[in-house]
Image (cartoon, helix red, strand yellow):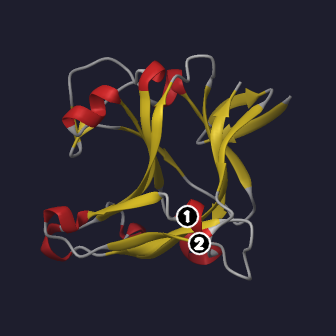
């Protein structure tokens, strides 16, 4: 059993169940972009495909800008109504793209169920990364209890893990370190037990 510290919470896994490796342009392109342009902002992001320097992973990268009330960038990956009820949570194997710049940033893992997809809500769990590959664990019972819409809490129960429809990565304005260029290298993601 491997123990992983994720944002101050001790959790462990016995086994990882891969959803996908981000080791090709086709797999990177499966992530759609949702940036603050939907509200008039000018932040940019993309899931960049593997490069010769990083052949086995893709990079969530871009720039957070505050003009026009902007301040967020995200990429989302649809799931075909997955029943994840037999798992403990979601995992993400990732690292900072640039140590000096990205270790000070806070990223968010987004999760949606069928109800969220109908009413533009989601669940978010914050995490930070170092410059070495890490397996980040996001237990369902701790990380996805309170839904929100546009940053505001909504009245509903926790994430319905029997009807998961989407996972995503986001960076959101806040502390000064959040603004500007960012990069998160992602090798794979899935569920864990």
Where is residue 67? Give x, y as percent.
18, 77
Q: Secondary structure at mark 1?
A: helix
Q: In the shown orientation, is residue 56 left or right of residue 148? A: right
Q: State the residue in front, 135 or 54.
A: 54
How far, Cα to Cα, is label 2 from label 1? 5 Å
Q: Are marks 2 and 1 in contact (CB under 8 Å)?
A: yes
Q: Residue at x 64, y 48 (%)?
A: 20
Q: Is residue 75 left or right of residue 127?
A: left
Compared with 127, 181 (above or below) is below
Q: Position of residue 162 (x, y in %)?
A: 47, 19
In which quadrant is the N terminus drawn?
top right
- Seen at 27% across and 66% down, the residue is 71
Q: Pointer 1: what residue?
A: 28
Categorize mark 2 by other alpha carbons within 10 Å: few (<14), some (14-19), many (20+).
many
Residue named by callout 2: 49
Q: Tell which of 175 and 23 is nearer to you.
A: 23
Image quadrant of residue 69?
A: bottom left
Among numbered discs 2 and 1, the one appearing first in the sequence: 1
Q: Quadrant of residue 103?
A: bottom right
Q: Is residue 137 above or below residue 14?
A: below
- Mark 2 secondary-structure assignment: loop
Dot 1: few (<14), some (14–19), or many (≥20) neighbours within 10 Å? many
Answer yes or no: is residue 92 visible: no
Of 9 and 108, nearer the camera is 108
| Image point (58%, 42%), residue name | 7
Q: In the orientation shown, which residue stands out farthest toward the bottom?
A: 52
């Amino acid at each position: 059993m491997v123990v992983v510290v994720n944002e101050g919470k001790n959790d462990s896994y016995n086994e990882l169940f891969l959803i996908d490796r981000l080791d090709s342009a086709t797999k990177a392109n499966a992530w759609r972009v949702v940036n603050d342009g939907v509200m008039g902002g000018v932040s940019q992001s993309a899931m960049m495909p593997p490069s010769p320097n990083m052949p086995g992973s893709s990079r969530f990268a871009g720039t957070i800008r505050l003009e026009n009330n902007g301040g967020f960038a995200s990429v989302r990956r649809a799931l075909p109504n997955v029943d994840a009820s037999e798992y403990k949570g979601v995992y993400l194997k990732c690292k900072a793209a640039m140590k000096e710049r990205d270790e000070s940033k806070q990223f968010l893992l987004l999760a949606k169920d069928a109800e969220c997809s109908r009413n533009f809500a989601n669940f978010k769990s914050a995490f930070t990364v170092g410059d070495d590959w890490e397996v980040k664990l996001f237990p369902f019972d701790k990380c996805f209890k309170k839904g929100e819409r546009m940053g505001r809490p909504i009245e509903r129960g926790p994430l319905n893990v029997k009807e998961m429809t989407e996972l995503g990565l986001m960076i959101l304005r806040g502390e000064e370190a959040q603004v500007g260029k960012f990069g998160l290298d992602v090798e794979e993601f899935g569920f864990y037990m």
